Amino acid sequence: MLLIDNKNNNDPFLNLALEEYCVRNLDMSEDYLLLYVNNPSVIIGKHQNTIEEINNDFVKEKRIHVVRRISGGGAVYHDSGNLNFSFMTKYTQQSIHNFKKFTGPVIDMLANLGIKAELNGRNDITVNERKISGNAQFTDTKSMFSHGTLLFNSDLENVVKALNVKQDKILSKGIKSVKSRIANIVEFTKEDLSIEEFKSKLIQTIFKKEHSEIIFNLSDEQWKDVYRLSDSKYRSWEWNYGRSPEFNIRKINRFGFGQIDLRLHVKDGIITDLKIYGDFLGHGELSEIEKKLIGIKYKKDSVTDALKDSDLQLYFGNISLEEFVYFILN
């Protein structure tokens, strides 16, 4: 495994572009680890409706960046007290959704600090039932990454104020507030550590080698490509906010794998437009499902026939065709 040098950059637009560039372009005969700390920012899951996930007034007032990532899951808050990790490997079916495999080194490092952490729920690392890390994955079926946050010493007030957490998610987790279920790692450490020292301990736990032996440096040409991707995609309104079509029907439900929020425009019994949002951890391109349904009659047989060849678990999680059609129509 090699450690990708991000040149200590704290620009969230650039760090997310670097992550995407590396997972799509590096030779995955090697495994890689990318570690980075971002300036204050809200990182939106790929399938989420940005404007509904953020407290827009607070975000603007505090000049917090808003950036969409290429993995699914929910929105998270980053600042200088949050360390982000991304393990990049070849794609295998055994690795996808296997958060235990990729969070294991982090949990081992925390154990070395005297902190008993565990993987909880579908993708969280918790200590004493309080969340210190959320995780998500991306794959293009050739390579993949599994990445996550580590709340080391973040401003938890800003975490709460910057995000709009839906009431159904709070109820489904049996909690009264976001703040009651999240924690900073410094609350549990006996050592007085800076985030850089914390990062160094994670590197030591994973690599157990001299620092100079593990560093991977991108070439100047590769960095130019990263900057181009950052400017053309990650700094664009179209990527970070995107379209929110007019709709006259809204279907929303929280499943075991996350929430699906479906907006449809139906005219004369025909689906003329739709958009799928959610915090699920699926990997397929939702535009493929959306295109299959546009122009289809808004009735059971037509919707079923349009989706019969689609692997819905790839896009959403553990859901059958019958369950999805029922969700759309009822």
Image: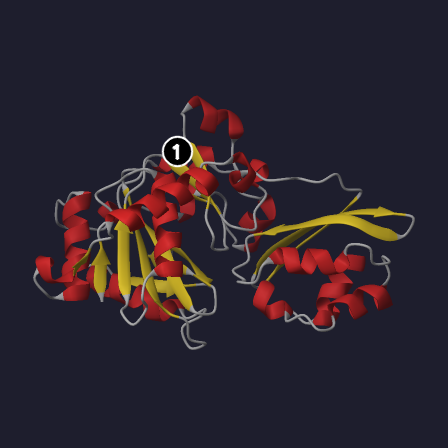
Lateral position of residue 264 relative to residue 145, left or right: right
Q: Farthest residue to the bottom: give it.
A: 94
For image coordinates 41% across by 45% down, the residue present is: 229
Colouring scheme, one of rainbow, by chain, secondary structure, one colour = secondary structure
Left or right? Give the position of 245 relative to 95: right
Locate the C terminus and report the quarter of the image it occupies: bottom right
Furthest toward the right, the residue is 268
Q: Nearer the viewer, residue 175 or 50?
A: 50
Across and down, in percent, residue 160 comes to 44, 37
Task: Work out which quarter of the rendered image holds the N terminus and state it.
Answer: bottom left
Examine the rendering and report whether any part of residue 155 can be seen: yes
Helix, strand or loop status at disc 1: helix
Q: Position of residue 24 (x, y in %)?
A: 40, 60
| Residue 63 image point, x, y percent | 41, 26
Q: Is residue 319 above or below residue 83?
A: below
Looking at the picture, which amino acid does disc 1 mark? Answer: Asn
Q: Which of the 4 image quadrants contains residue 207?
A: bottom left
Place residue 209 in its image quadrant. Answer: bottom left
203 vs 7: above or below:
below
Q: Which residue lies under the disc numbered 1?
A: 158
Bin the neighbour count of mark 1 within 10 Å (Cα to Cα): few under 14, some 14-19, many 20 and up.
some
Q: Residue furthest front?
A: 221
Q: Residue at x 41, y 48 (%)?
A: 181
- Say above or below: 295 vs 94: above
| Residue 317 makes an appearance in the image | no
Q: Would residue 194 appear left or right of 81 to someone viewing this image?
A: left
Residue at 12% from the left image edge and 49% from the top image edge: 191
Residue 178 figure quarter: top left
